[in-house]
Amino acid sequence: MRDLGRTVVYQIYPRSFQDSNGNGIGDLCGITSRLDYLADLGVDLLWLTPIFVSPQNDNGYDVADYCSIDPLFGTMEDFDTLVAEARKHGMGLMLDMVFNHTSTEHKWFQYALEGDEYYQKFYYFVDGKTDEEGNPGLPPTNWVSKFGGPAWQWIPELNKWYLHLFDPTQADLNWSNPAVRNKLKEIIRFWRTKGVEGFRFDVVNLISKPAWPWQDDYEGDGRRFYTDGPHVHEYLRELALDTGLGEMITVGEMSSTSIENCIGYSNPANHELSMVFSFHHLKVDYDHGEKWALKDADINQLRNLFRSWQEAMAAGGGWNALFWDNHDQPRAVSRFGCDSDYKLWHASAKMLATCIFFMRGTPYIYQGNELGMTNAYFDSIADYRDIESLNYYKILIKQGLDEKEALHIIAERSRDNGRTPMQWNASPNAGFTTYTPWIGIPANHEHINVENERTDAHSPWMYYQKLIALRHQLDVIADGDIKFIELAGQADKIIAFRRDLETAAAGQPQHMLILCSFASDETQVVIPEQLAKEIQSSAILISAYAYAPSRKKSLITLKPYDAVVYAW
Ligand code: TEU
């Protein structure tokens, strides 16, 4: 099995990676045609977001058949070819298992609607509440869906409500029913025999709901009742032990979770998962914790979150998935870096990569990160495709914002920012498709594209290639301890940490100091005395600018969005 510390995962959003049949939507054959590209970059595992049969209301996270390929993306034969060809390139596949809910078009849900009681028990079909006057027909609880609106849908034929933590067409599965758990194990076994190397489990810390009856939430949206729920660890262990997941690489997506639970999920002794995604660091620009309210990123908070997660997960034997971007997030370079000035864009794309690549965990590259791809900045609501963005646009207007204000928030926060097509070249559709793409392509593909960056020795692409190679080679990055460093007066600008490993292979550095600047201006950093002495004998391993920062004894001058790694 691959070593977690030396593995780099590349996330592909198939719909937006490469179209091979000219319908404007990316597909499996398109991915196969780009395997040389991915192998040159040097990545190890390819995580594909869902490619299964789906009505695509939530771009495949609404699965109607877990063991068939959606014709939109190709055939099972195309999938088998992709697995085989990827293996020839030394790469493995990870599939996205959406097990918290199914599409309401899934046959289990359809049988349930037809009155089959066995399948009704696969979901949460429950009676409503009566109001103060005794009239029936109120939702069972006041819980709110993650996509806005109530988390319950009324089914008049059955006189019941069903739970959907996401879209009404994504019905939550009842994991307390052993028959459900067994069905899901069969799906894992099916894909294992197809030769996939790993799985990503969608919102998997939401699968265990509390015992009935459920309560209203007067302080929040209900998440505190079902997040990291009562039996979640037990269910994950059972899934892993019964299907042999221990021999595979698995990552769980953990919504609003805690460090303590994540140690539980990912400590190998517990036999649950290899690693976890958590999202607290991607909420530091949410005003009062609210996604649809803007504020500047709080770098001090970001640093504190990284410090507590990195140090506590290490102490507890847990393992982090390291990432900034995915298909649900606006582009990090637009959020935490700078995308309006060529030089700063360049530096900040590299700085962000440095920051996570040198932490303890497994780094994930989301397609286009290696190019420094930016937000889309669509200027009309008609350009958006994502169900969550379209819902929230309406909600914001209802709350009294005018169209311009609402659109501004959507432009900053929409998941579509991360879903625009891969920018292969400067041609009108960026080399992604010969047809009209399913979603718009930012004009900056004229210079931010693969063709340009692979011929520029200083591009973000070349930098990523080096980072991946270093991950593979150096023991201290893969296995070292991590400790964050307090820099007097610079807490809101600089993230600094060190990595140490006493047992590094001969000739390899045992220590590293990583400095990342989130400031748009030049910043002077005073290194603590002892550390300044230690780095006297260091060499610069990699840095965001071609010229390393100047250093006078303990004083280092970092350029805007600089990153530098000292190794000794
Ligand atoms: O996302 C889980 C999730 O809660 C958030 O990332 C969510 O998409 C958004 O940020 C709410 O504000 C996973 C998938 O990654 C996402 O694409 C799916 O839409 C969602 O689950 C439902 O399956």
Image (spheres, rainbow, N blue to C red):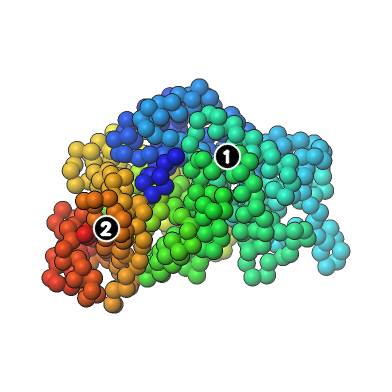
First in sequence, mark 2 or 1: give its number.
1
Query: Which quadrant would the C terminus be assigned to in this image?
Result: bottom left
Q: SS at mark 2?
A: loop
Left or right: 178 in relation to 527? right
Look at mark 2 in the image and give the residue it sits on: 510
Rendered position, 331 above or below 221: above
Disc 1 marks a residue whose amino acid type is: Gly
Q: CA distance from mark 2 to mark 1?
A: 35 Å
Left or right: 422 in relation to 545? right
Look at mark 1 in the image and give the residue it sits on: 244
Residue appearing at x 56%, y 49% in the figure: 271
Name of the residue lying farthest toward the top: 77
Disc 2 marks a residue whose amino acid type is: Gln
- Name the spot of residue 16 as percent of width and height, x first: 42, 37
Residue appearing at x 61%, y 59% in the figure: 227
Residue density around tag 1, few if under 14, some if 14–19, many if 20 or more, within 10 Å: some
Residue appearing at x 83%, y 68% in the figure: 132
